[in-house]
Image (cartoon, rainbow, N blue to C red):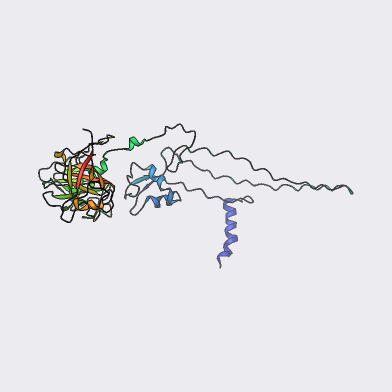
Amino acid sequence: MSIKSFGPLFLALGLMVGGPLPAGAQETPAPTPQAERHVVQLGETLWGLARLYLGDPLLWPEIYRLNTAVVEDPHWIFPGEELTLVPRDQTAVGVEQATPVVVEPAAPRPIETPPAGEPVEVPVELPEQAPVLAPAPPPTGRTVFARRERGGSNLPSLQMELEDRYRAVRWGDFYSAGFLTEGEKLPWAEVKGNADPGSIRGVAGASAIVYQVITVQAPLGATYQVGDSLVTVRLRRDVGRGWGDIVEPTALARVVHVSGRDVMAEITVQFGQVRAGQYALPAEPFRDPGTARAQPVTDGIQGNVIALRDPHPVPMQYDILFIDLGRNGGIAPGDVFEILPKEEDVAIADAPNQAMAELRIVHVRDRSATGVVTSIFTPGIRTVGPDGQGVPVRLVRKMPA
């Protein structure tokens, strides 16, 4: 027997059990209430949870906004984390199934026949004017998709003048530029690797990224405490002539656990790739010079370029280089130097002893300083000649004491 033949029987049973249905009425299934919390499973993302619970994966910031106390980085959620899907001030409201209303058809009205010989006027029905809907009330709470209000907002506007944005030296340049060891034996700690077992990057020796935890082995005799700041570095080439190795910072990290020489630190700022086998040092305190500006000087102290941090045939703007003047020569972060041509390079300069480029000092040690090339006046300049000797530099602007 075909399935279709059971149709009348099922209909009859439905009429006996549930009672007759009014004409034109349909049963409406009860809505499924939205879950209030969700425990993250392996492989899930905020994108997928927004698709599952909100019907649109692009609404994932709504879930992140409700769980900022649990989720530090929206790109990473971990199994076992319990996420809130409904705002705390929102209560579930039961929805009662509406009773269908049966509308009886109106009885036909008798048509009156006009007397013979009189014109027949056909009534014209004009379409009803659509009712004007009141504007929707504004949402009670701001979301990540809230538009910026225009016009009559009483909120104070944040204005930043050029003077407020100026800094002679910024902490990012101070910590990321690097320095020369000057032949000094520094208290190196060794970076052992990534300590995050819940990440695909948490394999021994794999690289670590910002907000992940790395393991560090402190040197003998060193004492680290929770909250200390470390700078992870990689040692580049030895520039020779007693200047030692080039130290290139890769990240800043904050100590979160100490057990003897075994230290765990969370990466807070990243400048490059952090890998096992690199080194770490206690971060040098940064003294912000504020908005003080370097003042012009005449007959400033002269020195020479030692080397470029990243070797290029031709230096470019924002390259890092080291000069042979340091703290012992009165050099301070924020000082400005001109790069002068060597005797054999005077021919390519516009005039003898005319500056070819300008650099600003961002880090100072006892005998050397680190500078950032801020301006290039003569394209194609060289900072270190074939003989290994650097071009001259001259102090032209000095930070106030």
Instruction: Give the residue drawn at x 50%, y 48%.
Output: 31
Choose top left, top right, bottom left or bottom right for residue 221.
top left
Quarter of the image where the C terminus is located: top left
Instruction: Give the residue drawn at x 89%, y 49%.
Output: 117
Quarter of the image where the N terminus is located: bottom right
Q: Nearer the viewer, residue 236 or 23?
A: 236
x, y percent for residue 44:
36, 53
x, y percent for residue 116:
89, 49
Q: Residue furthest bottom?
A: 1
Q: Is residue 391 left or right of residue 7?
A: left
Q: Is residue 129 left or right of residue 69?
A: right
Q: Is residue 281 visible?
A: no
Q: Nearer the viewer, residue 361 or 260?
A: 361
Choose top left, top right, bottom left or bottom right for residue 335.
top left
x, y percent for residue 188:
14, 47
Vertically, is 398 above or below 318?
A: above
